[in-house]
Image: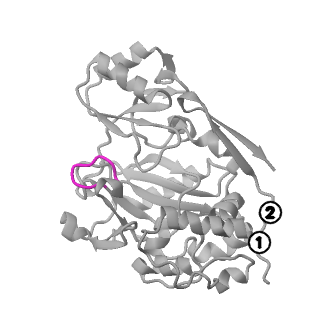
C-alpha cells in the first residue's frame, strides 16, 4: 500500500470541503474519484482525479496537476506563507501604514478595535458621526477584519445622526467609512453600479524574484444595480490575459455556467487600462510582505490611471483560478510542490475561540 505525505484524514477533508463548498450538488464526482493523480503520486501526495473531472468541465483543460484542497491548505500555503503571522495583517484599516505610497479608498473615519480614528488621530463616536455627516460625497461602510465576497458592504445614503449612531453600533468594531471609489470609465462600463475589481496573484520564488502569475488574473463585476462585484450579486468573472485583454467568457462556478460578456453587458474587446503599471505596483507591494510568498490582490484602476488597492489575501482561494485557467501556479508548480514536501507532518494546529464584538483568540501548538 502506497505511503503518502498527506494523511487519509487530510485527503478526506479536502474532498469534503470541495464537495461542500465548491461543487454544485448535482455534479457527478464519482467517475474518477478513486483514480489517483500520477503527477502527485510521483511526488508523494494522494490527490484524486475527481478534481480534473470538475475543473475541466468549464475550461476544457484536462490535467493531473490540479491542486486538491487539502494539499493546498495544509501543505502549499504553510510552505509559502507564515500562517501564524497572518492574523496581524487582517485588518484593512492598517493598509495605509503598510502601503503608504499606493492609492487606496479615502477613509472618512476608521474604527479599529472599538476606537474611532480620523487622519490617524483618535476621536470620539460623536466626532466620527459629525465627520460623516459633514462629508460631501458618496460613501460606503464596510467591516475590515475577516470578510470576503463583499460581506457587510453598504452604501450610506442621507442618514441623520441617530441613524448613523445605530449603524455604527450595528457594525460594532473594526469597520471603516470610505469615499465611494470612482473607477476608470473603461472598467465602470462593465457594470456602472459596482466597483469592478481585478484579482491578481504574485509569487515570490526562493531566489527572491517576484512573479506575476499568468493566466490566473480575472475581472469580477456585479449584477445590474449591485454595488458588490461578486456572483452572489448577479455578477460574473472573466479572465484577463497577460496584456490586459478581458476574455469574453463569463464564468459562474457554482452553476457551472459560461456566458458572454458582450451579450450580457454590450462590452467587447475590453483592455484593462494601465495594466503594466498595475502589475509593477503589485510586485512593489509584495516586497513589503516578507513573511508571505503568495498573495492574492484585489485592485482596480482610477480615472487617472493609478492602481487602487482594495485588499489583499494571504490565503487566496485557488478554486476559481483553476476553474478558469487550469492548474494553479502553472510553470512554477514543480517548484511549489517541492516546497510543500518540506512541510512537517506535525504542522501548526489552530484552536479558535470567538468572544464578544468579534474578538478572537488563536492558540497555536506545534
Residue that mark 1 sits on = 5
Q: Decide if residue 10 is on the left or right side of residue 306.
A: right
Q: Specify the quadrant that holds the N terminus.
A: bottom right
Q: Is residue 29 above or below residue 294?
A: below
The reply to whether dot 1 and dot 2 touch (C-beta < 8 Å) is yes
Magenta-colored span: 222-229
In reply to whether residue 228 is colored magenta, the answer given is: yes
Q: Position of residue 214 (x, y in %)?
A: 49, 70
| Residue at 41% across, 64% down | 218
Q: Is residue 269 above or below residue 235?
A: below
Q: In this view, does 137 lie above or below 2?
A: above
Q: Considering the numbered disc 2 on the image, is that residue within a helix, a strand or a loop? A: loop
Please identify the quarter of the rendering in which residue 152 is found.
Answer: top left
Please identify the quarter of the rendering in which residue 267 is found.
Answer: bottom left
| Residue at 53% across, 42% down | 146
Q: Nearer the viewer, residue 358 or 201?
A: 358
Residue that mark 2 sits on = 345
| Residue at 59% across, 32% down | 359
Amino acid at each position: 500500500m502506497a505511503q503518502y505525505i498527506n494523511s487519509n484524514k487530510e485527503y478526506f477533508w479536502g474532498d469534503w470541503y470541495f464537495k461542500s463548498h465548491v461543487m454544485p450538488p448535482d455534479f457527478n464526482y464519482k467517475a474518477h474519484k478513486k483514480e489517483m493523480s500520477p503527477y502527485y503520486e510521483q511526488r508523494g501526495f494522494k490527490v484524486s482525479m475527481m478534481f480534473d473531472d470538475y475543473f475541466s468541465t468549464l475550461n476544457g483543460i484536462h490535467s493531473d496537476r490540479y491542486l486538491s484542497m487539502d494539499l493546498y491548505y495544509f501543505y502549499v500555503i504553510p510552505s509559502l506563507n507564515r500562517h501564524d503571522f497572518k492574523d496581524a495583517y487582517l485588518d484593512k484599516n492598517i493598509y495605509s501604514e503598510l502601503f503608504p505610497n499606493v492609492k487606496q479608498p479615502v477613509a472618512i473615519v476608521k474604527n479599529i478595535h472599538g476606537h474611532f480614528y480620523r487622519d490617524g488621530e483618535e476621536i470620539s463616536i460623536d466626532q466620527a458621526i459629525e465627520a460623516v455627516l459633514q462629508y460631501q460625497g458618496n460613501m460606503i461602510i464596510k467591516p475590515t477584519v475577516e470578510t470576503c465576497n463583499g460581506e457587510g458592504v453598504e452604501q450610506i445614503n442621507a442618514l441623520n445622526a441617530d441613524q448613523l449612531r445605530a449603524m455604527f453600533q450595528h457594525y460594532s468594531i473594526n469597520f471603516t467609512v470610505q469615499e465611494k471609489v470612482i473607477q476608470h470609465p473603461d472598467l465602470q462600463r462593465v457594470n456602472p453600479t459596482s466597483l469592478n475589481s481585478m484579482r491578481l496573484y504574485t509569487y515570490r520564488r526562493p531566489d527572491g524574484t517576484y512573479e506575476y502569475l499568468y493566466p490566473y488574473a480575472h475581472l469580477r463585476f456585479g449584477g445590474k444595480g449591485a454595488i458588490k462585484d461578486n456572483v452572489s450579486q448577479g455578477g460574473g468573472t472573466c479572465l484577463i490575459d497577460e496584456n490586459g485583454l478581458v476574455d469574453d467568457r463569463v464564468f459562474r462556478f457554482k452553476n457551472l455556467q459560461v456566458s458572454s460578456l458582450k451579450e450580457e453587458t454590450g462590452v467587447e474587446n475590453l483592455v484593462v487600462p494601465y495594466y503594466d503599471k498595475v502589475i509593477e505596483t503589485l510586485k512593489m507591494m509584495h516586497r513589503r510582505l516578507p513573511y508571505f510568498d503568495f498573495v492574492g490582490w484585489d485592485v482596480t484602476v482610477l480615472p487617472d490611471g493609478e492602481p487602487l488597492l482594495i485588499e489583499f489575501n494571504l490565503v487566496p482561494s485557488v478554486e476559481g483560478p483553476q476553474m478558469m485557467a487550469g492548474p494553479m501556479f502553472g510553470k512554477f508548480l514543480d517548484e511549489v510542490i517541492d516546497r510543500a514536501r518540506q512541510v512537517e507532518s506535525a504542522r501548526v494546529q489552530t484552536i479558535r475561540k470567538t468572544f464578544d464584538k468579534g474578538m478572537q483568540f488563536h492558540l497555536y501548538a506545534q
